């Protein structure tokens, strides 16, 4: 595979990651959200494998497989089980309406493009053009955490944000050292379990996963 | 002076006029097959048109000149648009003088006059249809223009012939910007041609009508012209998508190349019909108030296409 084609596939996958990030932003159903998250993980792992092939960094294959197993199968499965057990309503509630969120999202993409322009100038990697997309994915994950009321959707936003960070590491420096990546993967997994426990507690205390209910906490008795 | 481009131009307009009803017939046939009904055949739209042309025109007493002229304007703009889009050959005199923005404007003129005509008689349904049509147009047009701008950026020109040539000779197949623009174009063309998630072309229920509501008062040859123009618009949008994003086999000047381009065009239209019917059968008509999200996502796709042109290419 020559470098030019690899760069093209890389940027195409980056575009797909961005598309799924926006898809999550506008998706109204929880299950649809989880599927989109799984797709994003899939594109990410494919992209990592291709970067690993092009740059001849074999540890990237390991992180690619790790991403595939963790973010495409395990985490979506855990979330599915959680939603099923907690009998959550399937509709996602947003704070800001969806067209406005889209506009903010577009503004964030432009912002991250400008922010990463100096990095792009300095870098000479094949993947340098995707740094902006990676940062945009981080920002969109953050935006999703801010604009959603529901704890589960906020967690998905957090996981999407982590996807963006992983993508940024791959595209800016051909990935972090394997030890760090293993640590992060483990952290995310543990975080998912802790979130699950938290969901149960929040649900039992407030009879809902709407985090606005937590405002009641401060009226201490 | 080389007369060949002019001949190709005339030929293309005639072909579009001729095959548009057949394309609509093909779409209806596929839909019937998918829903397990008996089809009326590929040529039923021709019979419908002939029947309408033979009937008398009945005009309301308070119909103004707008009402009478609109069918001709709509039909004329559709025919002109058929001359602008390079389908048989990229070397067309009209395609050289008018670019993609003119094309969008032509469709806008047709829509403007249709809406005026819908309100002209003063019936409730006509006004309702006009208002809905304008609501959709105000959302669909920016997305359409954005998609076209994205493709123009990638090709470095707004001229349709130029775009087709650049995409045809393109070094890359995997251009994210073109993929996004294509997705946006698909969503917008469903809205512009009044197909199912946006409008139901076969509805008989006035309250759910959008495009049909404006034509309720038309009869005879006026209605025939509207129907024919509608068929051409559908065919043209499909052909535009085919030549912009999949320009394989487009002719570059000779007669044989144009003949080949015609065969390719028919194949591509047949495939586009299948995709259209699959979309229409798989989806239900949306509520009117959800259309902002539908067309908003079209706009989002087009904008993402433009951004990814700057970021990734």
Image (cartoon, helix red, strand yellow):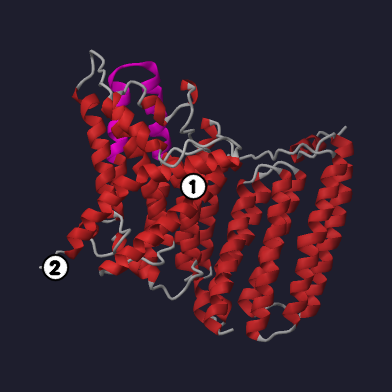
User: Where are the magenta residues, as a range?
Assistant: B109-138
Residue sitting farthest toward the left: B1
**Residue B168: quarter of image:** bottom left
Q: CA distance from mark 2 to mark 1?
A: 40 Å
**Which residue is label 1 attached to?**
B187
Coordinates of residue B115 in the picture (x, y in percent) = 32, 29
The subunit letter for the residue under badge 1 reads: B
Foreground residue among B45 and A30: B45
Residue A145 located left or right of residue B199: right
**Residue B95: quarter of image:** bottom left
Which SS type dominates the magenta stretch?
Answer: helix
Identify the mark at residue B128; answer none if there is no mark.
Answer: none
**Which residue is label 2 attached to?**
B2
Q: Please report whichever mark, 2 or 1, sits nearer to the chain's N-terminal start.
A: 2
The question of residue B115 being in magenta is answered with yes
The subunit letter for the residue under badge 2 reads: B
């Amino acid at each position: 595979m020559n470098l030019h084609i690899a760069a093209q596939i890389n940027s195409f996958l980056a575009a797909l990651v961005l598309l799924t990030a926006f898809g999550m932003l506008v998706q109204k159903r929880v299950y649809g959200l989880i599927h989109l998250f799984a797709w994003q993980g899939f594109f990410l792992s494919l992209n990592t494998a291709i970067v690993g092939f092009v740059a001849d960094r074999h540890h990237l294959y390991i992180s690619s497989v790790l991403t595939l197993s963790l973010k495409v199968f395990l985490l979506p499965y855990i979330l599915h089980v959680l939603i099923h057990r907690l009998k959550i309503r399937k509709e996602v509630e947003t704070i800001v309406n969806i067209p406005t969120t889209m506009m903010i999202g577009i503004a964030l993409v432009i912002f991250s493009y400008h922010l990463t322009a100096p990095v792009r100038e300095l870098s000479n990697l094949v993947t340098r053009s995707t740094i902006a997309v990676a940062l945009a994915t981080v920002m969109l994950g953050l935006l999703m955490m801010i604009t959603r009321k529901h704890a589960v959707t906020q967690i998905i936003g957090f996981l999407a944000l982590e996807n963006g960070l992983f993508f940024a590491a791959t595209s800016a420096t051909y990935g972090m050292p394997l030890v760090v990546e293993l640590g992060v993967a483990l952290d995310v997994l543990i975080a998912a379990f802790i979130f699950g426990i938290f969901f149960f507690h929040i649900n039992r205390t407030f009879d809902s996963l709407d985090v606005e209910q937590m405002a009641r906490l401060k009226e201490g008795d | 002076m080389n007369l060949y481009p002019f001949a190709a131009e005339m030929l293309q307009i005639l072909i579009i006029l001729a095959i548009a009803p057949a394309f609509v017939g093909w779409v209806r046939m596929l839909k019937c097959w998918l829903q397990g009904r008996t089809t009326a055949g590929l040529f039923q739209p021709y019979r419908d048109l002939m029947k309408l042309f033979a009937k008398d025109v009945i005009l309301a007493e308070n119909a103004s000149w707008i009402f009478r002229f609109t069918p001709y304007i709509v039909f004329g703009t559709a025919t002109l648009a058929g001359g602008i889009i390079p389908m048989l050959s990229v070397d067309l005199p009209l395609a050289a003088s008018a670019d993609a923005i003119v094309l969008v404007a032509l469709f806008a003129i047709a829509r403007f006059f249709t809406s005026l005509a819908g309100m002209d008689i003063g019936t409730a349904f006509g006004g309702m249809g006009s208002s809905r049509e304008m609501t959709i147009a105000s959302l669909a047009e920016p997305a359409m223009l954005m998609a076209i701008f994205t493709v123009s950026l990638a090709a470095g020109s707004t001229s349709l012939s130029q775009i087709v040539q650049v995409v045809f000779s393109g070094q890359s197949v995997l251009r994210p910007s073109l993929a996004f623009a294509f997705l946006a174009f698909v969503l917008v063309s469903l809205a512009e041609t009044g197909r199912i998630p946006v409008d139901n072309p076969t509805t008989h229920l006035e309250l759910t009508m959008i495009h049909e509501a404006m034509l309720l008062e038309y009869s005879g040859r006026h209605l025939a012209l509207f129907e024919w123009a509608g068929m051409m618009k559908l065919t043209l949008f499909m052909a535009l998508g085919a030549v912009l994003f999949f320009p394989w086999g487009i002719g570059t000047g000779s007669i044989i190349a144009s003949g080949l381009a015609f065969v390719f065009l028919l194949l591509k239209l047949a495939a586009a019909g299948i995709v259209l019917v699959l979309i229409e059968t798989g989806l239900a008509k949306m509520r009117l108030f959800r259309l902002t999200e539908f067309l908003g996502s079209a706009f989002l796709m087009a904008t993402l296409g433009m951004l990814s042109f700057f970021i990734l290419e």
